[in-house]
Structures are given as structure tokens and as C-alpha cells.
Image (cartoon, helix red, strand yellow):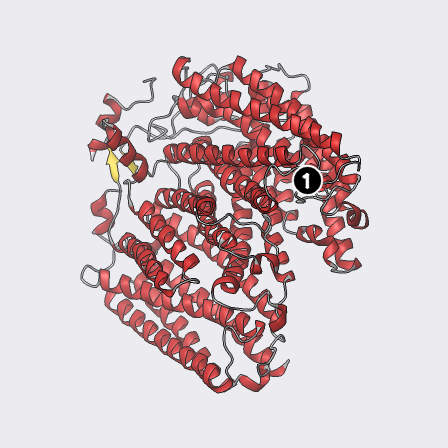
Amino acid sequence: MSTALAQKRGLGAAIWDYLTTVDHKKIAQLYLVSGGIFFLIGGLEAMLIRIQLMQPNSDFISAGLYNEMITMHGTTMIFLAAMPLIFALMNAVVPLQIGARDVAFPFLNSLGFWLFLAGGLILNCSWFLGGAPDAGWTAYAPLSATSPGHGVDYYVIGLQISGAGTLIGGINFLVTIVNMRAPGMSYMRMPLFTWASFVTSNLILFAFPALTVGLFLLMFDRMFGSAFFDVGLGGNAIIWEHLFWIFGHPEVYILILPVFGAFSDIFSTFSTKRLFGYSAMVFATVLIGFLGFMVWAHHMFTTGLGPVANSIFAVSTMAIAVPTGIKIFNWLFTMWGGKIRMTSAMLWSIAFIPTFTIGGMTGVMLAAAAADYQYHDTYFVVAHFHYVIVGGVVFGFFAALHYWWPKMFGKVLNEKLGKLAFWPFFIGFHLTFFIQHFLGLMGMPRRYWTYQEGQGLDLGNLISTVGAFLMAIGTLIFVYNVIYTAMKEKKVSGDPWDGRTLEWSIPSPPPFYNFKQTPLVRGLDPLWIEKQDGKTGMTPAEPLGDIHMPNGSFLPFLMSLGLFIAGFGFIYQVDHKGWLALVFIGMGITLGSMLTRSLKDDLGYHVHKEELEEGGGNHES
Amino acid sequence: MSHDDVLNPKEMPHEPEKATHEGQNKFLGFWFFLGGETVLFASLFGTYLALNESNAQDPTRSEMFGLELVFIMTMLLLTSSLTSVYAMYHMKNNDFKKMQTWLAITVFLGLGFLGFEIYEFTHYIHEYEFTFQSSAMGSAFYTLVGFHGGHVLFGLLWITSLMLRNAKRGLNLYNAPKFYVASLYWHFIDVVWVFIFTVVYLMGKVG
């Protein structure tokens, strides 16, 4: 199958290539583009929310539409923007950092992406088909179980499908990191980003099934007449809150840990120093992942679980501040005495530290259960979680994209434009959300459509909206930078940052088999060690030989298409049983594809040694 | 390892399911998957435990449940787990025919279990009008036990397809991990049933 080495031509061939690809680098691009588009959609929803709240008694959008906006803003940002961007980074970087030619399950990797996209599209179809979900992104029962129309049905089906994709992706990275590491790449030599991806994948594995069950219960109540949340028949709405947060709290660590890992790599690279306290950083990452499962009820302090439960969850929540503090100090000490280069990636990373620390501090305030009765469901909470999610995850994405962009696309994002995007976003962010702490303390509740004049809330909301516009400007400059870089910037070498880890030892973008010869890892920061010894690249761990690669497949797309079709069948069979036909057609496509996958042999192919020697070598193309 | 070595190995190693790199990945990946499945069933158990006394107009658990039928079902499923162990034993000894025979017995026992479960559900529905919609407990009961039953059905279809697909060509290093992973899945279903038997039926009768 040497045809795989030949360049295909034409738009149709390119589209077919992406529809059937199992190459983790291309899947990373798919995740990046779709996650990026959903991020812009979620941002647009945020702007509409802020315009509505700019003035008191505003009717810029109706109350019903406002409910849809807040629901879709949260759902989109968490599930359709942050999650795929996490997977974009993991796909682009993790196999390269551990010296692997591929992930453990290339087919499942592709399936994970297409399931995510199918779910995301279903969710957003709701806008055009009778109204979006409107029960808040947490979809608390009984509101979500009884909300009229099909909005929440779209939420349930869309998240169920994309959640399955996420779970599959998580298992893939777990096995990749355990089984696919290059010789010498022991656990305690793995870069922090890989470590964080490993812990995050564990969290995905053990957190997402709780959401799966929660969504099933809600689906059964809404579509098949069960009574889980129907108090009249003995149901109990608190079950939803528990299941949602047993998933939901680990979810915030699923989002933040990979960017913690990225920050660690960035601080180390641009301070030209090895990471301070590497083993403490690993320990802190694992501990955060572990504690992340023990704090879910701090979202439910006012539910009435009683003082004992509240106290236990308050203490475990506060305990998370300890490993997080370890991380903050280790990043500072990494920079201490280092030869610091102020690149755009570094700028975002340095801005992250004080921003995230403020978010962590308000987190400890919220963890005090008694005080939370005052903060609960006010803008104080909104300010808190935007400080950690935007100040942590979004800043982290910008930093990581600047850092790994050359590895993904072969070009460095324009530095001037990068800094030009940073300042309005950074200033706008603090303008938007800092004031919201005080709006919350003054009693402004979250999720309300509007507020009255003369309650001292006018100026704060105006400032907040102005800040949101600055953030939008920063984002648009970043998007412009991406286009500008693609058009104008020159190709760079495989190692533009004087990197320390394995991904910088191969060309940018890497050949489809990543490493012509598997590298031999001699310690932490393996490339840096070789550089210190006066070498230009890694020492190979094996002689040049045939490389085994997986075949592309159209089946992941088909499986996801089947579920996409079946999803609409499930949603509309409530109105008319004829829609069940779609369920059968869709499930038939999916199960048929699964059967084909199980029964048809697919052993992949080999890239032969001679071909590697001729063309597809490790040199710059 | 060339494709020919995988599909027509000269001699089968003792653990053919882990002889290839792909096999090792499948083995580990499936264990992780079962970890996720554990959380899935744990959530369903939690839901059931929260709602098992919310029977509204329906009869209580001890009025409905009978241990005789469930005991037979338990025996069928436990035995089927044992027979799948025999199948894997013969796989490791590269005795394809005996493996297929024991897998067939496993499938028949599983079918028996499923038949009894369907009988049990229809019995509750017709005798007590205890349905998925009649109370929160009904919803939780049918969801938990039904999810397990769905897993049994999926497992039966899976094992049967593998047996039919490979009936003519015998064991190799490509299909051995598939058989092995399917048997792991079958054990997991069995373990979940042990918990259902205890939490739903025994505790329902006694508690």
C-alpha cells in the first residue's frame, strides 16, 4: 500500500481524506477547527447576553430567548468548545511527546471525533427547529424534565452522542500513554502535558458514565414516560443534581489539567530551565485528579444535604487548593533565575498565574458552606467560574496554540499580532468579570433576564459589557492572526523555540508516521539532554525498518451519521410514532457499521524501509 | 510482524490474545472500558437505591419479587461465565473446536437467562401492572435490570458473530484478542448480575 505515500490531488480527494483519516495529527486539526467554530458561536451567544444586560429593563432579546442563550452559551463552551480543543491538543502533541508513531486506537480516535461533531451539530440544530434548550447548562430537574418543546430533548441527545465520543477518546489516550511510550520514556520522564493528559483521560473515563446515566434518566422521563424526576410518582429530582455534578465537577478538572500541563511545558521552554519540582508537579496533578471526585456536592450546599455532608464537602474542596498552590509556586520557581523569552505563549502563561489565583481564592470563599448560602446563584459564582475557566482554560488554549502551532502547521503564529490579541483580551477579561464579583455580592442573581434601575447594578453591568467587547476584539485579532500566518508567514524549522521535549526533534509538521526511527529516551527533557551533549537530534532506539500503519476508514463517520439520524428519530417520536422509522434506520446504520468493523479484517499496511530511505524521511520537506 | 504471521501463525503462543501489539492494546483498552462501565452501573444502582421504596401505587418489592426464578437465572448466568472460562482455556491450548463448543454452550445459557428475564418482566406487567411508567421505582427497576439485560443481548450477538465469522478459518493472532475481550465482557456482565441479585432481589425480599 505504497499509494498512501503518494500525494492525492483535488478538493474531493482532500475532503475524502479527512472523512476517513485515522492520523492523530489530522484528527487534531479536525478537533481544532470544529472546536474553534463552536468557540466563536459560544462567544457570540455571550455577546448577546452581555448586550441584553448592558442596561436595566432592556428588551434587546426576549426572556425566553435569553434562557436559550445562557443555556447554549454554557453547554457550547464546555462540551463543544473546551472539550474538543483539549482533544485537539492531546491528539497533536501526546503521541509526539512519548515518541509514538500513532495512538493505540486510531480507528476509535476518529470515531470519537465524529461522534463529538454529530452531537454538537444536533445540539445546534435546535436553534432552527423550534428552539434551543432553555433549562440552563446544568439542566436541573424538574425544570428540564418538564420544559415544553423539544429544546431539552436536543440537549439530552446531543450531549449523549458527543459524550460517547469523549469517553472513547479518553480510553484511547489512556492506552496510548500506557502502552505506546518509546524505549526509555518511563512515567517519571513524561512531559507534564502528557502526564496531565493521562490524568484527564482517567477523569473522563470515570466521570462521563455518570453523565451518561443522568442523560438517560432525563431522556426516559421526557420521551418514554418514566418517573425518575416526577415527584407525583415517587421520583426524586435531587438524583439529577448528584449525577450531574459527579460528572460535572471532575469535568472542570478534565478541562483545566491539560492546560496546566501545557503551561508547565511552556514555562520550562521559555525560561530555558527544566521544570522546577517535576515530581511534585506530577504528584499535584494526580492528587487534583483524585480529589476532583470527592467535591461534587459543593455545588449543592443549598440543596439541603445537611451540615455533616456540607462540612465534609467544604473541607475536601478547600483541600484542592493545596496541590493547586504547589503548582502555582512551582511555575513561579521555574521562571526564577531562568533566561525568560517573552513570546506570546509566555505572555498568556504569565497572565494566567494571577488570574487563576484570583479564581482559586474565590473558590475557597465559595467552599465555605455557610457563606455559600449568600453567594449561591449570584454573579459572584459567575465571576468565580469565569476566572478559572477563561483565566485558566482559555488563556491556556491561547498559550498552547501559540506554542504548538508550528508543530501542527509548520509556521509560527505572527508574534506582533499575537501580542496585539493578548492585551485587549486580557484587559477586557478583567473588566468583564472582576466587577461581577461585586454585582453578585450586591445581590444580582445569575440567569435573570434583566434587572431594575436604581439598585446600584447599572454601572457595573455597563463596564462588564464593555469588557466583553474588548474580549471579542482580542479573539477576532487572534482569528485574523491565524489567517495572516497561513497566507504570509514563512515555514520554520522543526524546533523554532529551542525545545526540550521529543515533539521538537522531528520536522514540522511531522511526517504521517511521526518518527522514522523510534527515539531512545535518556531522561527528562530528552531532546535537551541530547542538545547538551552536542548532538542535533535524538539517538534512534532501533535500526531503520518497515513501519506498520493503520488503514483509513469511512466507518467512524458512518457510525456517527447513524446516531445523528437516530437522534432526530428519538426526539420527534414523542410527537408521532412514525418518527421511530428514523431510529431504526439510524441505529441500523450504526450497528451495521459496528458489525462490519468487527467482522472485516483490517490489519493496516507497512511503509517499507526503501520508501523511507527515498522520500518520506525525517528531513525538512 | 507481517500480516501472514498474524493470520496464519506457524505456532500459536500460549497467550495468543496478547501476542501482538494490537492485542495488548485491546486487552488494556477493554479493561479501561470496563472501568467506565462500572461507573455506569454504579450510577444506575445509586438511582435504584434512592428510589426502591418509591413504589407509589405499585406493590412493594417483597410483595412482587420471587427468589425461585431469579435463583435459576443466577445459576444460568454463573454457569455461563464458567463455560466461557473453559472456552478461553481451550483457546490458550489452540483447540479451536472445543473453544467454539464451549462458547456455543455459553450462548445457550445466556439465551436461557434472557428468556427468563423477559418472562419475569411480562409477569410483573400483567400480574401487578408494575411497569416502567407506573412509579419511580418501576422506572429505576426496569432501567437497571434492563440495562443489564441489554448488555446480555449485546454480548450474545457479539459472541455469536465472532463464532460465525471465524468458524471456517480457526484461531489466529488477529481474532484471538477479539474472542478474549468478548469473554471479559461476559464475565463483567456476570459480576453486575451478582450485584443485581443481591441489591435488587435479596435486599428487596429481606430489607
Up the image or down, B201 lies above or below A295; here it is below
**What is the residue that sits farthest to the left in this orientation?**
B168
Residue A160 position within the rendered picture, expressed as x and y whole percent measured from the top left: 47, 53
Q: Residues within 10 Å of mark 1 (few under 14, many from 20)?
A: some
Q: Nearer the viewer, residue A273 or A203?
A: A203
Residue A143 position within the rendered picture, expressed as x and y whole percent measured from the top left: 61, 57
Q: Is residue A151 visible?
A: yes
Q: Residue at x 38, y 50 (%)?
A: A564
Total count of labels: 1
Up the image or down, A375 lies above or below B87; here it is above
Tell me where residue A588 sits by quadrant.
bottom left
Tell me where residue A337 sits by quadrant.
top right
The three-letter amino acid code for the residue at tag 1 is Val
Residue on which disc 1 sits = A382
Q: Quadrant of the N terminus of chain A?
A: top left
Residue B104 position within the rendered picture, expressed as x and y whole percent measured from the top left: 29, 72
Q: Nearer the viewer, residue A488 or A103?
A: A488
Regarding mark 1 in the picture, which secondary structure is present there? helix
